[in-house]
Image (tube, rainbow, N blue to C red):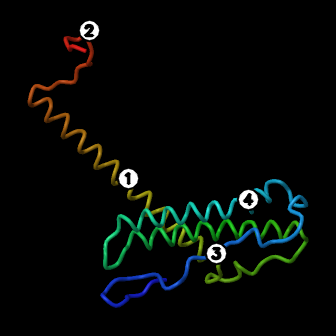
Amino acid sequence: MSQMKGGGEYRPTTKTPELEISDIKGDWRTLPALIMYRIRELPVLMNEALRNISAAAENDWAPDYTESFQERQYQYARLGLKALTLARRLRQLACLPGTRLDATEWSAQPVLWRRWRLERNRRYQQRILRERELATFQIANNQHNQNHGQHDKPAGPDHGDTP
């Protein structure tokens, strides 16, 4: 979530989530290795997400900080989905009842999936646009070189260039 602060700029209204695995007591060896690994990986993924969000913020502009908020929503949705998947697996392993985190369209899981998919689609569209722009630039550059007598030729001593 975000809201307009004094000075006309948007700022997050929710704090960065904290995840402290070291506070969990018990014998981790009782868990299957893959589940244990995925749980212990969450803080690492959290740090990676924070770095990505910070990088987006460094290259973003006031007043709305669009890239920062999109990155923040994407990263937290990704982490939330990983945590939900682990919670489901742990519930199954412990023979606990299923979760209600997907009971309605406004429950955590569908909301996180929608945000994640929306951002993945946006990133895909941006990548396509960048690839088209690059291809257009390369075509224009090649045409410019051909029009000005600069043909592609290999470099090196065998082709008239001196080392």
Residue drawn 28% across the image and 49% down it: 133
Asked whether 93 or 35 is in front, the reply is 35
The picture places residue 33, in percent across and down from the top left corner, at 83, 54
Taking 52 as reference, is 6 above or below it? below
The answer to whether marks 3 and 1 mark residues whose Cβ atoms lie closer than 8 Å is no
Amino acid under disc 4: Arg
Q: Which mark is in front, 2 or 3?
A: 3
Q: Earlier in the sequence, mark 4 or mark 3?
A: 3
Q: Which residue is mark 1?
A: 128
Amino acid under disc 1: Ile
Q: Label 4 vs label 1: CA separation?
A: 32 Å
Q: Label 2 vs label 3: CA separation?
A: 62 Å
Q: Which residue is mark 3?
A: 18
The answer to whether marks 1 and 2 mark residues whose Cβ atoms lie closer than 8 Å is no
Residue drawn 34% across the image and 83% down it: 9
Taking 56 as reference, is 103 above or below it? below
Amino acid under disc 3: Glu
Mark 4 secondary-structure assignment = helix
Q: Which label belongs to residue 38?
A: 4
The picture places residue 124, in percent across and down from the top left corner, at 44, 57
The picture quadrant where one finds residue 5 is bottom left
Residue drawn 18% across the image and 40% down it: 140
